[in-house]
Structure formats: C-alpha cells, structure tokens
Image: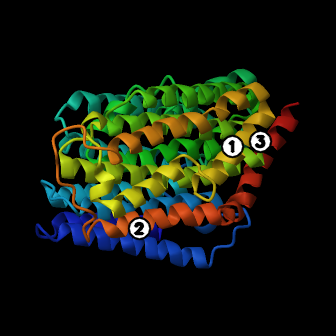
Amino acid sequence: MELILISIIASIITYFVPKGMAKMVALLGAILTLAYNSFMLQSFVADGTKKFVFDTPWFSDAVHFSVGIDGISMLMLLLTNILMVVILLGAMRKEWKRESLFYSLILFMQAALIGVFVSNDGIMFYVFWELALIPIYFLCALWSETGDYKTTTRFFIYTFMGSLAMLGSFIYLGSKGIVDGHTFAYDNLVAVKLSTTESMWVGLGIFIAFAVKIPLLPFNAWQPSTYAESPTPASQLLSGIMLKMGLYGLIRWFFPMVPETHEFWSNLIIILGVIAVIHGALIAIRQNGMKRLTAFASLSHVGLIAAGIATITIVGLQGALVQMFAHGINVVGIFLCIDIIQRRTQTRDLTQLGGIAKQAPYFAALFLILVLGTMAVPFTNGFPGEILLLKSIFGYHTILGVIAGLTVILCAVYMLRMYQKGMLGKPNGETFHFPDLQKSEWPALILLSAMVIGMGVYPQWIVELTEASSENILKIIKETVEGVS
C-alpha cells in the first residue's frame, strides 16, 4: 500500500513543480520507492504466505482494496522499482517537451505496475492493469519519434480489448464464487470449481489479455512498431516491465483459475511460445534497425519464458522468474545503449554504423556485457534462467525442447551481428565523432552491468525468494485437478 502511495504522491508533485525540477523530483521519488521496497525486503520472510496485507472494502462489499506480497510479488516489485530508477537516470540525459507531464506519467505508471503485482482482488487487479495502459499510451503518443498515432492506437486497442475479455472472465468467476463479503478475493476466485466448458471460456478471456501483453503469437502485431517508434523510456517500460505483467498473470492468475483445462492451455502456450522463440529470432537476424531487432529478440525471449511457465513445474516456474528479472535488466540496458548511439550518430541503422568501439571503449565494454547477458553466456544473468527453462521444456516434450534450444544459437547470431556491425570494424556511413560515456550516462550502465554479472554469479537469491510461493501455486493447481478427477 505504501509503495503505491509513494509513487502516486511523487507523480503529483512532479507534475506541479517548476520546469527544470521535474527530472530531479521524479528521480528522488523513484529512489524513495526503491528504498522503501528494500526496507520491506529486510523484514520479508519468503515462506509462501502474503505479507504486508492491507484489506478494506472498496466501492462495494464484493470488491476490496486488497494487497499482499509473497515472494513472487516481491521479485516483481524489486524489478519494477530498480528499473524505474535506471530508466529515469537514462531519461535525464535529454530535454523533454512538457517535462513535468513526461516524468509524472512515468511515476504514475510505476504506481499502476506496483498495484498489478500486489493486488489480491480480481477487480482491483483489473483496475490497476488498465491504469498502467493510460500513462504508457500518452508516453508513446505524445513523445513518439515519428508522430504516427496509428501505431499507438493499434497498441491501445489490442490491449484494451484483451483487458475487457479478462474482466468478463473475472465477473463470471465472481458470480459463482464463495460469497463471504469479498466475492472477487483471489482465494475465492481460485476456489471456484468450473466445468470443462466453463473453464475453457473463462480461460480464453484471461488468456487473451495476457497473450496480448506478453505478447504471444499471433497477438504481437502491435509490438515491433510500438517499440521502435516510442521514445526510449517508453520502450524500456514496455519491454522491461510491462510485458512482465502478462507473464506474472499466467503464473498468479491464469493457471490457478483454470486448472480444470490446464493441459489444453499448457499445450497451446508451449507450442505458441516455442514458435515465438524461432519466429522472433529469425526476423531479428534480418533487421538493420536496432530497435526493431531488439523488439523481435524480446518476442523470442518471452516466448521461451511463457513456454517454461506452461510446463507447470517448479523448474519451469523458477526458470521463468529468474529469466523475467534477467530479461528486464538486459532489454532496458540494450535500449539505453541504442539511445546513446542514436543521440551521437543520429541513426540506429546498422548499415550506417561501425567503428564505435575504437572511439568509445568504455561504452563498448559495458554494451558488450549487456549483449553477453542477453545471449545467456555462463556467469551472466541470462544463463541460469535459460538453462532451467530449457530443462523444463525438455521434460515436457523432447522435440519441443530441441526446437526451443535453438535459441542458444539464434540469439548469438542476431546479438553478435548487431554488436559487430554497430561497434566493430570501420564506419559504414559518413565519418562521425563518437565521444565515450558522459558523467550522466555512467550510473545507469554501471548498475545494469553489475546486475548482469551479479545475477550470473549468484542467481540463488531469486530461487530462495520465490520457491515457496511457486510451490503454493502448483499446489493450488494440483489440488483442483485431483478434485475434478
């Protein structure tokens, strides 16, 4: 509850402060939120139960403002609040029109994201899910690099329609739930027993919302153009944190609520996820635009994460959680590096770049660390999660595991191609001067690079933080399945 309030208050203050102060006030607000989150972590016991619970009737007895934090929620909060500081540090290097509004929207989105990850009520979850769409829509539309509103409108329509389908499923579950004055409580929704037909339709509504947000094929049409045309902070929010809403939703809400048909949904999601791994990677290899390349690379990576979640195993869930955290760090860092390149050279086209490493060796070294993390090189943050995910998919189906395992090769191809064409050799376009990192650019890249290496050396803290909560979710699913059988 306090985390949401801090972000909202900081957002309001940022909007009203004089021009020129907004960036510092926003950064201070994000740092304060992260500091409070870290304070909560100190007293947090990862035993699978919800901590820091706050529950009070909201706009009816059936709908409560109910929050609680378990290990999975805590991980998502840490990812959100760490990356928010990094994103703001990166954004401060540039002057933005309507500066106060720009930074206020970022902090408002932080509050909405926190609300999604701590919600303990279905309607509350939906409300914060929709609230997160409002600031990211305006960030993408008002500060678009192309001024094309078609892309942003398509993104809004995709996500809004998916959200309505989820709301319909929640209302149906609530109407059949255990009436104890809090109909839409998470525990009540999970306890509802559905017939196979009901489970299919309820699952479809929830699945569409999460599949669009992740995104999974064929719900990804909005993604590449939105990532490419949005300002860098918006691209970072979308790829680093917002898509985790969909993955988190699969773990927390989707499978525990439709366990009666979990085998059907597992098969479907694993197949779609594995297809996304190959589809996204093959398209990424052909891209010369660095932002679009990163967008399709992200599609490939989240496809693997979704497939791991759908195996409904402890290895798959924990691999997904480790990789969700690692992906957020890596993709935010890659987009930051692309933005630095674009600001120096006025392009992000690989055919017009080259030779940057000779002029900016420190930048090249930190960029390489992020590239290696994305490639899941041993002792980087991408390695532990990818191994666990591939193990879970191999255990589910050997052939699908082999196909998914191609990500190891394909990711190396498109990431090394991007680095080689952009950073090495001789400039392919006009000669340009590329200064090395400025003082304002060091903090974000150093922090991200340190996390890439730190997580690679010691990923066990995520496993320990989320293990009990993951086992609880698996227990919910298995108990319902056994009751049905």
Mark 1 — residue?
389
Quarter of image, res 69? bottom right
Q: Amino acid at mark 2?
A: Ile
Looking at the picture, tell me which residue is in the foreground, 184 or 215: 215
Residue drawn at x 47%, y 75% is 36
Q: CA distance from mark 1 to mark 2?
A: 28 Å
Contact? badges 2 and 3 (CB < 8 Å) = no
Is residue 428 in view?
yes
Disc 2 versus disc 3: distance between alpha carbons?
A: 41 Å
Q: What residue type is disc 3 on?
A: Ile
Q: Amino acid at mark 1?
A: Leu
Q: Residues within 10 Å of mark 1 (few under 14, many from 20)?
A: many
* Nearer-N-terminus badge (2/3): 2
Task: Give the foreground label among 1 and 3.
Answer: 1
In this view of the protein, can residue 60 be seen by the observer? no
The mark closer to the camera, 2 or 3, is 2
Q: Residue 23 sits in which quadrant?
A: bottom left
Residue that badge 3 annotates: 477
Query: Which comes sooner in the sequence, label 1 or label 3?
Result: 1
453 vs 253, nearest the viewer: 453
> Image check: 336 left or right of 241?
left
Residue 481 horizontal/vertical position (percent): 82, 35
Q: Which residue is mark 2?
A: 446
Instruction: Measuring from the top left, give residue 453's x and y in whole percent.
Output: 55, 63
Q: Quadrant of residue 404?
A: top right
**The C terminus: image quadrant:** top right
Mark 2, secondary structure of its residue: helix
* Label whose residue precedes the other's in the sequence (1 or 2): 1
- State the residue at coordinates (43%, 38%): 417
| Label 2, residues with CA under 10 Å away: few <14, some 14-19, many ≥20 | few
Q: Which residue is most to the front?
A: 426
